[in-house]
Image (cartoon, helix red, strand yellow):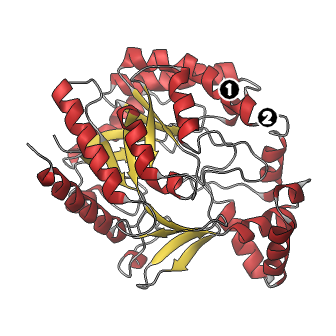
């Protein structure tokens, strides 16, 4: 049994169609009900309607990505108990409809962070980048977060100031729009005031408190997932370090192991994202894959070029600083083990996580950064070839 090749699709409004996804060679789709407000129940009828659309094109719905966790749950504030109840109901409804894998994250406020979404790569394609001094300039001089200077060294503050002083008003506006970009598929973003208010609400919550909230949340939802036959897959922080003074608790191997130990169950697993984890020079992603493979329920494959200043660029999938061969080999061997042992979670879906925008991609309207057709098709093709080569090189 090979790894399951999937493709992220943002629903009927996605400029990439299901028919086009079929042409990529993917056999399954990763999607979410973005039209439903965060915190509300995903009803069975809506899940089945999305499933019918997918299956009508000869594909299957492999993973629900994402079933977002409401900020009140992360803070354990407000109506968090009601929201946890709705979350477990959504898990149950997905299980009833045959969608057995759920990707989610526990990142406060921001789902991901980049400082430039229109970087020209060496081959002329368009990619994304995170640059530490640029993010610091936003934090210090645009957002003007109280106490922000404590998060940076004197050298970082000087670099951020020099960068900021060279920006014109249009460039400042573009930076704000980039950092406050909403969830893929949702077309929602924060205003500066909303963003500042959201950060302020975490002032009394550090890593320890957020970890306690995650573990308490797991103890509520994992029994429901087990009962429904659903495998939860926690996504790591992107990037895997603190931003804006906010806590980060899913950033390295120790974090991930602590998460898994909180509730020991096949339903409590990981989304192993090579790009998110690989953004930090402190993470050896190949070793992490070997250490954690048995608890991986979903795989995101993406490569980055990085440095020790906290900068990274989304690279081609078989280039960059992540040893993609090592990760893929680990996952192929783990897939074979699960098949031989007949484990409940033997299906291992993976998707090409992001792709550069090619010239052809730029002819499409409203392509979300990283979610191209042709760039991701190239990535899937390369990853598929890598998988086949590894499979054939292993002893019988």
Comparing 111 with 85, the one in front is: 111
Q: Position of residue 47 (x, y in %)?
A: 39, 33
- Outermost right residue: 146
- Outermost left residue: 396
* SS category of the residue bearing label 1: helix
Within 10 angstroms of label 2, few (less than 14), some, or many (20 or more) residues?
some
The quarter of the displayed image where residue 140 is located = bottom right
Alpha-carbon distance for marks 1 and 2? 10 Å
Does residue 77 show up? yes
Q: Position of residue 57 (x, y in %)?
A: 21, 50
Q: Position of residue 297 (x, y in %)?
A: 37, 35
Pick the quarter of the image with the C terminus: top left
Say which mark, if any, is on residue 213. Answer: 1
| First-in-chain label (1 vs 2) | 2
Q: Which residue is mark 2?
A: 205
Residue at the image position 68 percent from the left and 62 percent from the top:
179
Is 100 situated left or right of 152 in this image? Answer: left
Residue at the image position 47 percent from the left and 77 percent from the top:
126
Comparing 81 with 350, the one in front is: 350
Relative height, residue 367 to residue 231 (above, below): below
The quarter of the displayed image where residue 32 is located = top left
Relative height, residue 82 to residue 366 (above, below): above
Q: Position of residue 242 (x, y in %)?
A: 71, 50
Relative height, residue 273 to residue 174 (above, below): above
Pick the quarter of the image with the N terminus: top left
Is 305 situated left or right of 188 in this image? Answer: left
Is 47 situated left or right of 173 in this image? Answer: left
* SS category of the residue bearing label 2: loop
């Amino acid at each position: 049994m090979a790894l399951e090749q999937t493709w992220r699709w943002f629903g009927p409004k996605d400029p990439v169609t299901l028919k086009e996804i079929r042409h990529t060679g993917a056999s399954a789709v990763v999607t979410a009900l973005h039209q439903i407000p965060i915190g509300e129940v995903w009803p069975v009828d809506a899940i089945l309607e999305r499933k019918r659309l997918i299956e009508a094109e000869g594909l299957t719905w492999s993973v629900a990505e994402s079933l977002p966790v409401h900020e009140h749950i992360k803070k354990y504030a407000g109506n968090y108990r009601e929201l946890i109840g709705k979350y477990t109901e959504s898990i149950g409804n997905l299980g009833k409809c045959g969608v057995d894998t759920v990707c989610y994250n526990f990142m406060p406020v921001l789902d991901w962070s980049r400082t430039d979404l229109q970087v020209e790569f060496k081959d002329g394609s368009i990619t994304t980048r995170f640059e530490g001094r640029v993010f610091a300039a936003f934090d210090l001089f645009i957002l003007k977060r109280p106490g922000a200077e404590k998060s940076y060294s004197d050298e970082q503050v000087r670099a951020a100031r020099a960068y900021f002083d060279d920006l014109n008003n249009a460039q400042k506006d573009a930076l704000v729009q980039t950092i406050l970009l909403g969830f893929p598929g949702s077309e929602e973003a924060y205003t500066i005031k909303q963003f500042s208010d959201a950060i302020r609400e975490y002032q009394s919550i550090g890593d320890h408190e957020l970890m306690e909230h995650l573990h308490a949340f797991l103890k509520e939802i994992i029994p429901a997932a087990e009962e429904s036959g659903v495998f939860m897959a926690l996504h790591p922080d992107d990037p895997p370090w603190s931003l804006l003074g906010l806590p980060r608790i899913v950033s390295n191997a120790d974090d991930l192991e602590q998460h898994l130990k909180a509730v020991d169950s096949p339903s409590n697993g990981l989304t192993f994202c090579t790009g998110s984890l690989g953004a930090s020079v402190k993470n050896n992603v190949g070793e992490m894959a070997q250490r954690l493979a048995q608890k991986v329920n979903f795989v995101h494959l993406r490569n980055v070029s990085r440095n020790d200043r906290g900068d990274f660029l989304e690279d081609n999938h078989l280039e960059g600083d992540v040893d993609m061969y090592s990760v893929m080999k680990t996952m192929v061997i783990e897939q074979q083990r699960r098949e031989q042992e007949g484990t409940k979670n033997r299906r291992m879906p993976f998707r090409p996580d992001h792709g550069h925008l090619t010239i052809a991609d730029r002819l499409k309207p409203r392509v979300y950064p990283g979610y191209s057709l042709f760039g991701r098709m190239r990535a899937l093709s390369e990853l598929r070839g890598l998988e086949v080569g590894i499979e054939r090189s292993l002893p019988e």
